[in-house]
Image (spheres, rainbow, N blue to C red):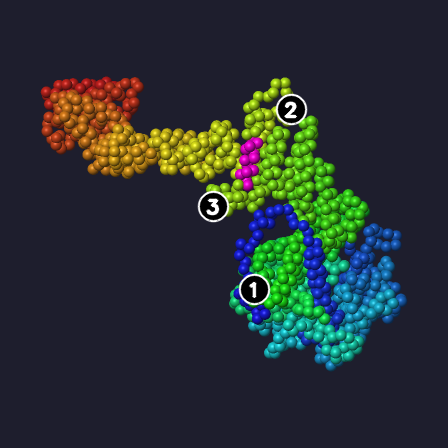
Amino acid sequence: MFRSTAAAPGTFPTTSSAKPSQAQMAAGPPPLLDLPSLQSASRVLHDQFVKDAQSVPELGDMLTGSGLQSSAAYSVYPDDFKEIKFYATDMSVSTEVEMTSVAGTNDGRIFMSGLQDGNLYELHYQEKEGWFGKRVQLINHSVGGVQSLIPRLGSTKAEDRIISVVSDLHRNCFYTLTAKNAISLYRTHGDKAVQHIQTLSNLYKAAQDKAPGSPALTPNTFSIISLHVIEPGRSQSQYGVQLMAITANGVRLFFGGSMAGSYRQLQLLHVRLPPPNLIHPDEQASRIRTQQATGYSLAHQQQQPTSRPYIVSGLDISCYDAGSTVAAQPSDISETDFLLCLAPDLTRIGSLGQIHGPQLQQAAYSGMYGASQGPSRPILTEHATLIPIPGRTWAMAPAPRPPLAAAAVTPPDCPAPVIINELATQFSEPVRQFMILTNAGLTFMVKRRALDYLKDVIEDFQAERNPQRLIEFRDSFGRDQTCAMLLAIASGNTFLDVGEQVGLSSSTVSPEVAAVARQAFYDFGERPIWAERMTYGTSEGSGSATFSGRREGLALYFARLVRPIWKAKLVKPGSLGQQEPNILDDVLVVVQKNLSALKELLDRNPAIFNSATGDHTGARSAAFSEQEAWKAKQASVGQLMALLARTIEAIFFFLLLTDYKIGDLISQCDAETQKTLQTLTFEQLVTEQIGVAASRALVNVVINQQIGQQISVDTISSILQERCGTFCSTDDVMLYKARENVRKAAESRNPVERQNCLSESLQMFTKGARILEFEKLQEIAGDYQQLNYAKGAMELPLHCAQIFDSDNQGRDFWYAGCPANDPRTDFWQKRKHCYDLVLDSLSVFEKRCESTKQPGTVASVYDDPETVRSHAYELAFASDDEIFHSTLYDWLIDRGLADELLEMRPQYLEAHLRREPISVQKYQLLWQFYVKDGQPLRAAEVLGALAEATEFDLSLESRLEYLTLAVANAKSHPVAVGGRHETALAFLTELEEKLEVAQVQLELYHAVQHKAKEPGEVGAKIKVLSKGLLNVTEMYQLYAEPFDLPIVKLSILHVSQHRDENIVRPIWNRIFEDAIDDVEPEVAADRIFSTVVPLGQRFYPSEFAFPLRHVASLLVRFALANKSVVLFGWAPRILVQCGVPHAEVWDILHEMYESQIPPFNAQANVQHVSSDIAVLLNDWLEDVKRPQSSAARAEFPVYRIDQALDQYLSELEPSRQETKSLYEGVKRQLRRYW
């Protein structure tokens, strides 16, 4: 960061930990007002008002010498085009003279000059046509009564014609300018008449007397092009200026008035020569960076010679506003104008606390102009620049000030800065603009302020990291002014944007610029200084502190923000005899917005007013005087901060009163309060006891008004407490009244009256809950229980739970899972104690319902135990406190009311069941919740997660059950719900696969369950198998393979869809071997049949677990090996019973018949296969013939079978008559039926 030689070293800490927590800010009742401190801070603001009023003199007080002019840039730039609206007046009058230079007066009269004749005309209009006048008519005052009274002035000679008319709205007069440079002063004098007051002629000679020998004053160049009215100052100085005339070559003539009878006579006070050192716009490009970066500081440097000075000589149009002058003349380029821009240099004429101070007028000048000798005064020093603008200028004028600027004027009783002192107004008013109309269009030009310069300097510092320009700016404007502007930038003043005209938008200052401004504010602030004053004749002394720039900058910025409202009266007489607001809402909103931004900045950076390391009051090396200075500074800053917070609250309070029609409120106050409010200022409202008393009276009226209209006062009370707590602190009174209402309710025998008292008490307890101790809350809850007041017993503890944990630390602790050794535990315990009170009330009401009523007693509707209990549960479930709901659900579940809870399905039940820590019970309730709520897919997700959860000790059967339920619920998911059809299908497929794997695991478990009690690794492995779900790889490698379980292996291959002939064929070989070993062929055949058929029915057509051709080969080979035992068709009939289609079995047998591969190369084996085929075809044919057959008759391959039968019969041995008969029978049936 940067640092000047006088700045405090180091940077200030801005860590977030320094910001007070919400708990610290909200804890306890609002502090008592320290009115003496507020009044002390208010005096500081008043001192700043006086400084601003005196730091820059009025324009007339500086027009006493020639004054050097700065060549620094004027700081204007074109703005975006803005909308202009024209309104039709429906007023017109025909004339042969072209009218120019129109001017209007305060009373609505319109004057103008004639272009051809140079006469003074008035456009007179009235509402209706009359006997003696038209509705609209044109009056020529140059040939009317004025000429008859003063014939000389009525002359209409061409060389003496009027060319300009200017109205002075401040002084209720108007001026005219003639072609011969004569200026006349007029006043309106009755209807359709004007009074000529004075004419100033021969102004060239008068100007030469003021500036003898000046080359700018020659007969050929002395031509006045326009007149401009100067706003009157408040000081009523003897040098008061009211009119300025400007010539074609830039000479300005300033006229002031001296009293002569009932009006002021004009006289020439000062001649301001044109700037002699203007830089041609072409050369400004090379210097613009330096000019923009240093801004006003260039005024204090030695002027650099220019190789191309520019002399204005053809100005033809100009305008003036608040000390700034803009004039246009043709440039040296066709269709382009130069704008001559002039503005006071406040760093040279103002007493801003700079190192060099303002430039003072030399005594010789007073004698030169014939003025009376007096104290030295500063010379008017100005900025001057030329700006090119495209097109030829037709007209220019100051842009109308927005309503906010007009409303934000300084109140009458407040010291006001002069109008040219933009330093005092740049924080609370929009920038001044000029409208330039050319043949190229309308351009808005904005005069940049010191604040804009400083922002540019900071942005340059960001780019170059060179603090020199910042230091130069500080030296130009002084430490205090710079600190005030830095504070405005750091806090994001709403008028920082040059295009902002309302001040209600947020500033667009970047965080980087704000950070630099904040650090510069700290570094430029320096240290406070203690000045010791010894008391004569004693050893004791006293002293005073010279405050640091930080404190002065804060006071200055604060004062400038509140100047428009501080001394203003709150109300003024309105219509119908009622009072109405004297300060516009928009003004208050803008001030509040900027004050709030300032407070937020200071709250976010509490160390900004502290010293750096080693500089604070506790440093050992600090001298006593330095410690006293720091103490004084800290005390003053603390008072200003308190006043800042109080002022923000006061603005909100007054805006609230405005919303409630402050005139009506005042009329309902007592006479003394009404009298006080009629003269009460905003400052008194904030800092004085009469303001405190008046605010309390108004609050009481508002509350009573709400009660009288039977409107709840909760909203207004909460708003007052939140936004302006120092204006409304009635918590203790409300609590007292609430307890009194509980007592009345206990004593009352009228149920309705008792309920009303209890309801009022609950409202008051709720408002005062933040100062309610838990023991008192417990006692109140007990009273509500005894009185069967369910609403109070439920709502008050729940409200207190929120209040006791206002910064939500307990809530965050609960959301974090209630970690151990957490400092937020205490806040959670406060919440939980309140919840326990609610649950205790529910228990009490439950017990009363269970207990039998005493015979002979009849309870009212308010005392019926069932009604009270039901109402209590309704209120409990209606709460929006999620943490309480979770506590309530656990309480109900522990009491065995889970089914009832699922039927109700309250709003937070789902979140409660999903919240950590999870449990089997929560998951079981959660999936049932989703089923009842019509969300089967989410129920399936929960069941799936529960089945796979490893943190729960669940049996394998339970996990399989959960997966089965998950699949069933997933299948129940509607197709069109939520657009999740594809996701639901994928999830269902995944669940079904997991279910199949789990079923295999259960099969595996049943296969090895008998070994579970074996010691060692085997028993341990089987126990693992029964607790969790395994994948197929684990089951195969850890169990099926080691325990040699061929059928389980086939199941694993089937569900995993793993195809490997080298694995599956040995498994089937083993199955056949187990069936054949050590038994007779007849038994082996039966064992094969009983083994293969179930496996085929289970796995076919899965080639992963049921390799059909290999199984068929094993069956046929067994049949061939045991021809004497196995009947023809044994093998194909087994395959058909496995579910294999006849056609597929025939294809396999036919391949064997044709293969000639051993053992089918032997004729006996081929003939045996032929016999199997004959049996298969006959069975197939009979199956097709049956009416209810699953085999399609149309799909029966008749032709192919017929062809094959011819082959089979031709190759059949003659000895196989049975087989031959089967073939022939099949052939006959084919002929018969097809």
Mark 3 sits on what residue?
821
Nearest the eye: 914 or 986? 914
Q: CA distance from mark 3 to mark 2?
A: 50 Å
Mark 1 sits on what residue?
619
Amino acid type of the residue that numbered disc 1 sits on in the rendered structure: Ala
Residue 22: x percent and y percent? 57, 49
Amino acid type of the residue that numbered disc 2 sits on in the rendered structure: Ser
Which residue is drawn at the image coordinates 48% and 31% (left, top)? 893
In this rendering, would 825 be left or right of 661? Answer: left
Which residue is drawn at the image coordinates 64% and 41% (left, top)? 768
Q: CA distance from mark 2 to mark 1?
A: 74 Å
Labels 3, 2: front one: 3
Mark 2 sits on what residue?
860
Nearest the eye: 1205 or 1164? 1164
Nearest the eye: 1000 or 124? 1000
Label 1: few (<14), some (14–19) or many (≥20) C-alpha neighbours in 10 Å:
few
